[in-house]
Image (cartoon, rainbow, N blue to C red):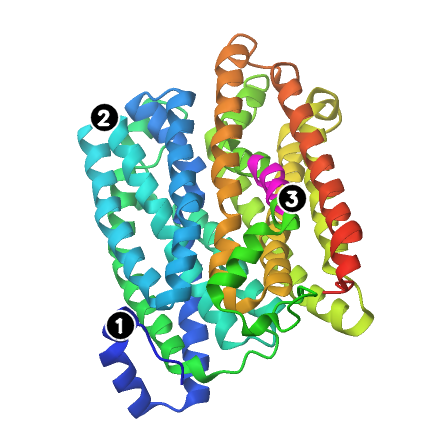
Amino acid sequence: MTNLSSVEAWLTHHIRQYLNTNFSQPTLKKLAFALALVSCLSAGSILLFSLFSPSLTHTLHYTLVNINTIASCSALGMYLFLPLLGHLADKHGPVILSTLSLIMFVPNYFLLAMAYKHEWSYWYMCFAFACIGCGTSSLYFSSLLTCAKIYPNLKGMAISAPVTCYGLSALMGAQFLKLAYFRNQTAVTTSDEDILDLYRVFMSLTVMYFFVGLFNWVSASIVAIERAVVFDEASPLLTNDEEPNASRKSTTRRFRDFLRDKTAWLLLVSLFLNLGPEEMYLNNMSSMLKTVYAAYPGLTHYSLLVPDQLSLHSTSSTLSRLIMGGVSDYAASRFGFCRVYLLIGCVAIAGVSQYLLMDSNHYLALLRPPAFFNLVSMLVGASYGGIFTLYPTVVASVWGIDMMGSTWGSFMVAPAIASVTFNLLYAQRYDKYCQVNATELGHCLSPFFSMTTVCFAVSAVIILAVWKLSWMKRGLVVF
């Protein structure tokens, strides 16, 4: 068995002793996989941010720039630390991330509850959401690596299962927050808006993540027991002609080769162009609905529809993750169909969603607002889920699953920067133009959505060029 680091050995010592004594190896694999999926089902509370926005606006009187600054901080915390988290996981195992998730989630959701209740400066919110973003990535990445390292021969499904559960967590959370317990009854009686009592929401999440963190700790500890697993598909598909046996390189040297690979940087750019607009839509559903619904006073208040839109997005994303995970494995092994085509298809779907928003005045004349936003949310969700399933699968296939923590973690710099960039660009344009002409989403935001449509087109070209002009020349035709 591979020697454990001193940190991993210390964190898992008692759990490993107990599990080794009482369970067989096959049972431990199933237990780790199940607990990792349960953790992912609970990990997506940060995806519910658009449900928090009306409460922050109504109760704390935040502007859209304030709200998008908080959302950007959460994105920075969620993505910017992933290269470091990936390196720590490769060095000390997923259990180090489980420990970090406990530290980041529990105290900071409690801080959010206090900041909301006592109306502290919104910088407390920024700090807490940044830490929660880091905790989200720690919990999710720990679960993802646990599944991938326990079942390395089924990369598509081993990656898509936790990714799917993570997407499903937003759907479950949106429905859970519809309970009367979480409604702000004072706001309901004084206005038409349906507002969350964020103090109760944040306190409930504090308690939930304490127990989820413990479950994930057990799951990640089993990976330490499973270090003897032979990774049949763990070796990278790309090799250097001068050093054909890349699997024998030290991890550090192979990671340096990865950083020098120009195709990795091009793939990073494509991920930036894809996830920036998608994260922006997820964080700003509320303001888009508010703008359009102002022209339709007879319809249900927009705040009542935000959970439904988030649920549609999550459902579409979840189905996409499941389908892409299974189909990509089956199509690649049975028919020699490369995952690149599926990835480009997901990018094209996202481009269609942005085109609809760009020309929303025309399509709103054909479809009523509920049907229009249902369509857009489902398209964005399908693309979002597919991208988060196929990109890590491609990375694991190309550069090796044994380095996935470091390689895929490095790619997460892209959505960190992209989310901040596109959130703030949207907020600045919205506050400047949409407050003046509040019922014309297509007019005040059409240039912005024109830009995002072009972003997806450029991304698709980059992905195709990287595969055709570089990877195929190095023998990577189907993966």
Residue 320 placement, left or right of 22? right
Residue 271 among magenta residues: yes
Is residue 42 or residue 218 the one in the foreground?
218
What residue sits 52% from the left and 41% below the top?
415
Question: Hey, what amino acid is under mark 2?
Answer: Ser
The quarter of the image holding the C terminus is bottom right
Occupied quadrant, residue 348: top right
Occupied quadrant, residue 437: top right
Question: Hey, what amino acid is under mark 1?
Answer: Ser
Question: Which secondary structure is most common in the magenta stretch?
Answer: helix
Q: Secondary structure at mark 1?
A: helix
Residue 333 among magenta residues: no
Q: Which residues are magenta?
A: 267-276
Choose mark 2 or mark 3, whichever is in front: 3
Is residue 262 or residue 33 the one in the foreground?
262
Mark 1 highlights which residue?
6
Mark 2 highlights which residue?
121
Mark 3 highlights which residue?
266
